């Protein structure tokens, strides 16, 4: 049976590709800044382009959203770091000595991979954008194949556009845009890229990212903030009115005009005694100022719910539902789903070729796993065990199980237990 890669293509056995392929072309070097002058119509157009497989403008927009919206950037970073910061392990396929030796080599190889911690964050960029790709930079040393680095590639370097005459309705995997194939792209070589897809929703990868629904909140919030700034500029400070009497010279009028326009910053002016500057308080519009704040907070809560799974925010009141403690956490089911998906991607697209290059095809594959179990209340757990033993008569709980659950090390040989 022929071996296939993660895309279902036959793998030709041989050496890994050592050259760097994901080089940014001149046409993709600079952003088009699609968020500038963004409107609902333009946003819908950008999404329609992405639905056809052309993801460049959507990828650039998502990048700008993270740069410009502090709240969105914060909660998305929280979501990614919740998984990237978990402890991980490489589990042997079996307890056979050969399988354990392979697992030990893989763990060593990942340890020596440059920026493996950062690479996990890069792959989790798929949570917001639907997919993320990193190029594997292989190297050969000491007679073995190693992973030198995992280099993140911007989503705009890829396309999902189907070539004319294709039998499929939509590309399921991205293709790399190159100078030779600037429209439809080239198929990714086997064992050269790690492509992680976040299954936030069903459907094609360009529509799967959490930033799709967040984009509308980003747009509405931008409108609100702009109006809020204008409102504060007009009504938070008193109106400055300059008055000059009959016969005031043209030179004095110019001085008065300059003083009125600069008074907000200079707070001082020298004018003729025949002219007057008045500051008029505008109280009629103050009552509507909280409208902007309420809409901004609504958009932030919606983004928090989409990304973290709850509406807690950094501005929540401690001690209440949705407090700061909750805001620092990702909902446990989302954390587990992200961790399982990323672990499978690393196992199948990074560890598998690493094993096959070094130990040959058909070798038992170790698995990459995150330790994502939620914290356990040890006091409540101890009371549960006591109830089982005292009231139910369940006295056959193995000592090893108790030590594992409570993190109690086994005594050394000869020591008192």
Image: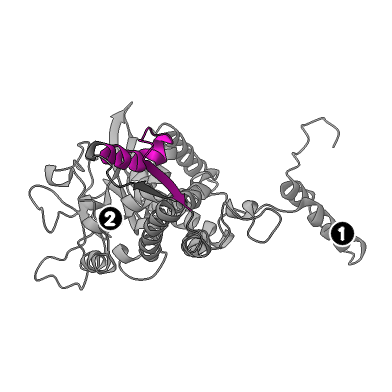
Please say whether residue 304 is one of the residues in the magenta stretch: no
Marker disc for residue 395: 1
The mark found on residue 346 in the picture is: none
Front one among 157 and 397: 157
Total number of numbered labels? 2
Q: Which residues are magenta?
A: 252-280
Q: Please identify the quarter of the rendering in which residue 172 is found.
A: bottom left
The residue beneath circle 2 is 35
Using a 10 Å C-alpha cutoff, classify the residue at mark 2 as few (fewer than 14 neighbours), some (14 to 19) or many (20 or more): many
At mark 2, the secondary structure is loop
Horizontal side of 323 relative to 401 (left or right) equals left
**Residue at x 50% of width, y 49% of height:** 78
Give the Cα distance between marks 2 and 1: 65 Å
Q: Camera-side residue: 25 or 192?
A: 25
User: How would you rate the neighbour count of disc 1 (Cα within 10 Å): few for under 14, some for 14-19, many for 20 or more?
Assistant: few
Residue 105, quarter of picture = top left
**Image position of 405 (left or right of 344):** right
49 left or right, relative to 319: left
Residue 290 x/y as whole percent: 52, 62
Percent position of residue 9, x then y: 23, 58
Q: Is residue 264 magenta?
A: yes
Q: Position of residue 309 (x, y in %)?
A: 53, 63
Mark toward the start of the polypeptide (2 vs 1): 2
- State the colouring used for the structure image: one colour
Q: Residue furthest top?
A: 142
The residue mark sitting in front, 2 or 1, is 2
Q: Residue at x 36, y 40 (%)?
A: 274
């Amino acid at each position: 049976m022929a071996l296939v890669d993660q895309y279902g293509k036959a793998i030709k056995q041989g050496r890994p590709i050592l050259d760097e392929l994901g080089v940014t072309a001149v046409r993709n070097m600079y952003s088009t800044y699609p968020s500038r002058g963004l409107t609902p119509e333009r946003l819908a157009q950008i999404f329609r382009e992405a639905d056809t497989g052309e993801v460049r403008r959507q990828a650039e927009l998502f990048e700008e959203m993270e740069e410009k919206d502090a709240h969105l950037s914060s909660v998305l970073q929280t979501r990614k770091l919740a998984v990237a910061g978990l402890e991980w392990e490489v589990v042997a396929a079996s307890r056979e000595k050969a399988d354990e030796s392979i697992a030990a080599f893989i763990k060593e190889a990942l340890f020596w991979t440059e920026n493996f911690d950062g690479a996990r964050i890069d792959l989790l960029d798929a949570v917001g954008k639907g997919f993320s790709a990193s190029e594997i930079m292989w190297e050969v040393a000491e007679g073995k194949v190693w992973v030198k680095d995992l280099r993140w590639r911007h989503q705009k370097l890829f396309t999902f556009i189907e070539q004319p005459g294709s039998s499929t309705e939509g590309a399921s995997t991205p293709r790399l845009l190159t100078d030779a194939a600037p429209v439809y792209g080239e198929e990714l070589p086997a064992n050269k890229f790690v492509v992680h897809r976040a299954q936030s929703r069903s459907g094609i990868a360009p529509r799967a990212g959490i930033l799709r629904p967040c984009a509308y909140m980003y747009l509405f919030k931008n409108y609100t903030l702009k109006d809020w700034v204008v409102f504060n500029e007009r009504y938070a400070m008193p109106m400055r009115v300059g008055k000059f009497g009959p016969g005031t010279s043209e030179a004095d009028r110019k001085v008065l005009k300059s003083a009125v326009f600069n008074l907000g910053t200079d707070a001082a002016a020298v004018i003729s005694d025949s002219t007057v500057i008045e500051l008029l308080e505008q109280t009629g519009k103050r009552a509507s100022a909280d409208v902007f704040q309420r809409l901004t907070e609504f958009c932030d809560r919606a983004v928090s719910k989409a990304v973290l799974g709850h509406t807690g925010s950094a501005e929540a009141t401690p001690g209440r539902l949705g407090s700061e403690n909750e805001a620092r956490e990702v909902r446990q089911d989302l954390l587990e789903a992200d961790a399982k998906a990323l672990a499978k991607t690393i196992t199948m697209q990074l560890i598998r070729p690493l094993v096959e290059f070094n130990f040959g095809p058909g070798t038992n594959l170790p698995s990459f796993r995150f330790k994502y179990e939620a914290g356990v209340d040890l006091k409540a757990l101890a009371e549960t065990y006591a109830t089982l033993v005292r009231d139910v008569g369940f006295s056959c709980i193995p000592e090893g199980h108790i030590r594992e659950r409570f993190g109690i090390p086994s005594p050394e040989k000869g020591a008192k237990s």
